[in-house]
Image (cartoon, rainbow, N blue to C red):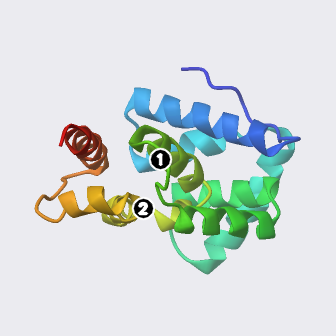
């Protein structure tokens, strides 16, 4: 997999690119949540390693186990100002499909959800949030069906869009 070590970032795009590479590696290796945390922390080098040690000490005093969402949230706070991070979280919460296609909405949903990891830790909330942002005619189609997971929800939304166009 060989994602690069993270030694710090000079831009938010650089940090997000590293996180994306890590997520790809996690999926390819089918990591457990515990393995993801261990691997992500291992990939922090130089000043980010020392920065994490101080964050870890703080988190350890607050409560028990550290989650991957907490690691990523702390890393985002290091790269982004807290006000910018709150702004991106609000963008995520206010996101709706509008004039976007389902594919475009899915891409934007996934992009913005990375800035709000604590808001989508629960799979059910993630699915509900995505569904609520769809166009009303697509949302109505979900009233009679239940999606079993996020990918299933995306697939059904795309199918509903096709049926809507045809009818």
Q: Secondary structure at mark 2?
A: helix
Q: Quadrant of residue 11?
A: top right
Residue closest to the eye, 112 or 165 = 165
**Closer-to-camera residue (107/28):** 107
Question: In what element is the residue under mark 1?
Answer: helix
- How many callouts does the rendering have? 2
Residue 66 visible within the image: no
Instruction: Give how far across and how far down residue 59 sits, in percent.
Output: 65, 70
Between the C-alphas of marks 2 and 1, the distance is: 9 Å
How many residues crowd mark 2 within 10 Å: few (<14), some (14–19), many (20+)?
Answer: some
The residue under the point 40% across, 43% down is: 102
The residue carrying mark 1 is 105
Q: Do tag 2 and tag 1 residues touch (Cβ < 8 Å)?
A: yes
| Nearer-the-camera pick, 143 or 90 | 143
Horizontally, residue 96 falls left or right of residue 50, namely left
Q: Position of residue 166 (x, y in %)?
A: 20, 37
Q: Is residue 35 left or right of residue 112?
A: left
Q: Residue furthest top?
A: 1
Q: Residue 30 placed where, x, y %?
A: 37, 33
The label on residue 133 is 2
Q: Would residue 26 be seen by someone viewing this image from the given angle?
A: yes
Question: In the current view of this chain or complex, which residue is farthest to the bottom?
Answer: 62
Foreground residue among 5 and 18: 18
The structure residue drawn at horizontal position 76% and vertical position 39%, both measured from the top left corner, is: 13
Q: Is residue 18 above or below residue 139?
A: above
Q: Quadrant of the N terminus?
A: top right
């Amino acid at each position: 997999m060989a994602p690069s070590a993270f030694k710090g970032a000079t831009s938010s795009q650089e940090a997000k690119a590293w996180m994306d590479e890590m997520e790809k590696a996690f999926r390819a290796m089918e990591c457990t949540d515990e393995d993801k945390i261990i691997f992500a922390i291992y990939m922090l080098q130089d000043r980010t390693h020392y920065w994490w040690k101080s964050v870890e000490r703080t988190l350890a005093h607050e409560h028990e186990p550290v989650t991957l969402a907490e690691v990523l949230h702390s890393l985002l706070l290091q790269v982004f100002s807290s006000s910018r991070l709150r702004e991106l979280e609000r963008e995520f919460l206010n996101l709706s499909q509008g004039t976007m296609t389902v594919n475009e909405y899915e891409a934007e949903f996934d992009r913005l959800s990375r800035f709000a990891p604590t808001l989508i830790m629960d799979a059910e909330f993630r699915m509900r949030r995505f569904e609520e942002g769809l166009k009303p005619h697509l949302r109505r189609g979900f009233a009679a069906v239940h999606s079993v997971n996020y990918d299933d929800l995306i697939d059904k939304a795309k199918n509903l869009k096709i049926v809507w166009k045809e009818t």
